[in-house]
Image (spheres, helix red, strand yellow):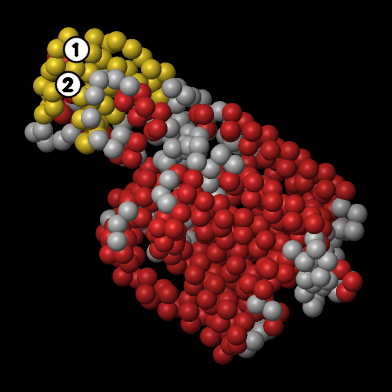
Amino acid sequence: MSDVQAIGAAATDSVPPDTGGASRHSAGRVDLVLVAVVVLGLAARFWRLGTQSLWYDEWVTTLATSGGAGDLAHHVATREGAGPPYFVLIWGWARVVGDGEAALRSFSAVVGTATVLVAYVIARQLGRPRRVANGAALLVAANPALIWYSQEARPYSLLALAGALSVSAAIRLDQRAGRSDALLWGLAAAAAVAVHYFALFLVAAEAVGLLARRRVPPRTMAIGCAPVALVLVVLVPLVVEQRAHAANQAWITTFSLTGRLEQAGRLVVAGTGPFTRWSWLGLVAVVVVAGLATARRLGTEDRWVLGALGGLVAANVAVPVAAALVGADAVLGRYLLGAVVPLLVAVAVLLLAPRRPWPGALALVVVLAVWLTAGVANMRDPGRQRPDWRAVAEAVAAGDPDTVLVVDAAAAMSSPLLRYLPDAERLGGAETVTVSEIHVLDARRFEGPCDFLVGRACSLMFLGAPLPAEVAAAFHLEERVVLDQFVVERHRAERPVTLAREDLVHPARDASTWVWATDR
């Protein structure tokens, strides 16, 4: 049975041949718990899908979908740091369903829902009982990080699915050791690497594990490795071209490696929720304590499964961290999402595999309750949402038709305004504009952990700067429009004034300040 067939059979609880004590009577019976879990995962991913504005990275995705095939290829080579599969797929998706916020994000939502089923399949392939498989599916369905990136028009939901599929194919190859199984694993592994280069660490760990097990003949293993090697060769020119535009990724190392690793742990364990720095470790402690209570009742196969999955996850994190320590640093929490599904399957095995898994079941309830609470807190707190450029555009549009908007500090991140203020253009060089109003964007202050461009806690939200004295003398502050995330200060003159960009920007902050001119 192929992996595609296995996923399709998951809802009817098809039992792999090596499940031992599973009853034949249960085979073919609809698993209503799994159905409910998939519906939960679907609902969580499509809930309020189009409510938030597109943030900068999602706006960059719209650049990939807006042109022809040649424009798409140029975009991936010069603006992205990942392989082409997601962008090719979203390019086609946008031509079918449209390029609105919900339409673009719906691709990731569908992919994220499919990942729930793959988690179930992995657990069943490993011979774990149905309660473990359902627990793994539930953890994937409710995980805040996977939900967040299932609602984002970026490649990370697809990375999680591709990583999970490669693990599933590796298990199949280990169990059957056929040439077709090796080819299937090679194709799945190659696809994962093509989706995002960080998947190479997971795929390499799978290959090492398969070789160490010695169940797959060397020639058969070579068949599996061939697609991966071919994809790597094909991707080399693209990687070289992307490295030539490495400024797109240079911001990563402006954050400390320790801080990024802490954020990666917090992202996977608790999502982008209302957790202060390191407080998410309390949730880890709950799982560890419950795991210690159940570990002594785990069988030999359970322990082997935990070791195998844990090894995959550890390699996916340790190798890029080691590379960072020697100078090749690109570690970021969302780049590690390819290993989240095997991690959650391992947690389900640890907590639910014993015949009487009450400590683990209670811990699972605690984890799900915390995730639900964090999700509700996120929805109720605009400060933890993506930047609301739509609200900024509405505030500016409510003023004089001819105006400028001054955005200070990391102002390139305000580029989505091109979507929400379609008549706006960036004022530069010696260009001048005659206006009666000036809008200055400032941020509402927010105390909370930095989730790397998520919410207003990260200096993504702009600090603002006073107008130069010469301009301030001709304009007066008429209104401060207080939004959920921003403050828009509206300055007005008694009569129109002709201004150039240099008139609106402090010389010391010239490079970081953008001026958007509107003409409606």
Examine the rendering and report whether any part of residue 77 can be seen. Answer: no
Residue furthest left as drawn: 430
- Circle 1 is placed at which residue position? 493
In the image, is residue 331 above or below residue 393?
below
- Residue 315 position in % (x across, y down): 57, 62
Residue for point 56% across, 82% down? 183
Residue 115 on image: x %, y %? 62, 59
Q: 10 Å neighbourhood of mark 1: few (<14), some, or many (≥20)?
A: some
The residue type indicated by label 1 comes to Ala
Image quadrant in which the C terminus is located: top left
Compute the Cα span from label 2 to label 1.
8 Å
Question: Total number of numbered labels?
Answer: 2
Residue in the picture at 59% in, 47% down? 45
For the N terminus, the quadrant is bottom right
Amino acid at the residue labelled 2: Val
Q: Give the number of the disc on residue 23.
A: none
Secondary structure state at the residue bearing disc 2: strand
**370 sits to left or right of 189:** right
Residue 116 x %, y %: 66, 57
Residue 386 in the image, given as x and y percentages of width and height: 47, 36
- Give the residue pinned by disc 2: 435
Instruction: Look at the picture and state if 479 lies above or below 419.
Output: above
Quarter occupied by residue 132: bottom right
Label whose residue precedes the other's in the sequence (2 or 1): 2
Q: Residue at x 67, y 61 (%)?
A: 117
**SS for dot 1:** strand
Q: Residues within 10 Å of mark 2 (few under 14, many from 20)?
A: many
Q: Quadrant of residue 300?
A: bottom right
**Proximity of marks 2 and 1: CB atoms separated by less than 8 Å:** yes
Q: Is residue 484 visible?
A: yes
State the residue at coordinates (66%, 53%): 140
